[in-house]
Amino acid sequence: MISFQADCVDTDQRNLDLSTMRPQNTLQAIKDTMGSALGIADSRITLRGLGEQLAKEAGDADHTKNPACRKSDCPGYFAHPHDHAAAR
């Protein structure tokens, strides 16, 4: 899964749109970098745009910058195969 969260700087809809586009861009950058070495079928990759969810949970008011809430996350899916072998 690749997810992205936004802060509250823009409108709710714009932040949701950004948080939806950024995982797509992240996936494309990973594909461009890794090529066929990625080895994960598109059907197994989930993209999630979470909008301002984290910022709202942190209590941020509308139009508040919070760089900690602007983040993309892809936990463990794109680690090098040798990393998986070492973890066993």
Image: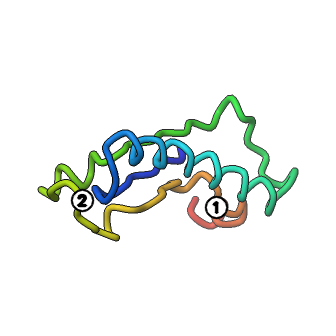
Q: Quadrant of residue 9?
A: bottom left
Q: Residue at x 34, y 54 (%)?
A: 10
* Residue 47 screen position, x and y as percent: 55, 39
Query: Considering depth in this image, is 53 or 75 the residue closer to the camera?
Result: 53
Q: Which mark is residue 87?
A: none
Question: In what element is the residue under mark 1?
Answer: loop
Q: Quadrant of residue 76?
A: bottom right
Question: In what element is the residue under mark 2?
Answer: loop
Q: Is residue 31 shown left or right of residue 84? A: right
* Residue 25 screen position, x and y as percent: 65, 52
Q: Is residue 7 shown left or right of residue 61? A: right
Q: Identify the mark nearer the N-term, 2 or 1.
A: 2
Which residue occupies the extreme right position in the image? Answer: 36
Counting labels gives 2
Q: Which mark is residue 79?
A: 1
Q: Residue at x 53, y 54 (%)?
A: 74
Label 2 and label 1: CA atoms lie apart by 35 Å
Q: Residue at x 63, y 55 (%)?
A: 26
* Residue 37 screen position, x and y as percent: 84, 55
Residue density around tag 1, few if under 14, some if 14–19, many if 20 or more, within 10 Å? few
Q: Quadrant of residue 40?
A: top right
Q: Is residue 11 shown left or right of residue 1? A: left
Find disc 2 in the rendering and name its residue. Answer: 63
Residue density around tag 2, few if under 14, some if 14–19, many if 20 or more, within 10 Å? few
* Badge 2 vs badge 1, beta-carbon distance below 8 Å: no
Q: Is residue 54 shown left or right of residue 49? A: left
* Residue 61 screen position, x and y as percent: 14, 57
Q: Nearer the viewer, mark 2 or mark 1?
A: 2
Does residue 62 lie above or below 45 as drawn?
Answer: below
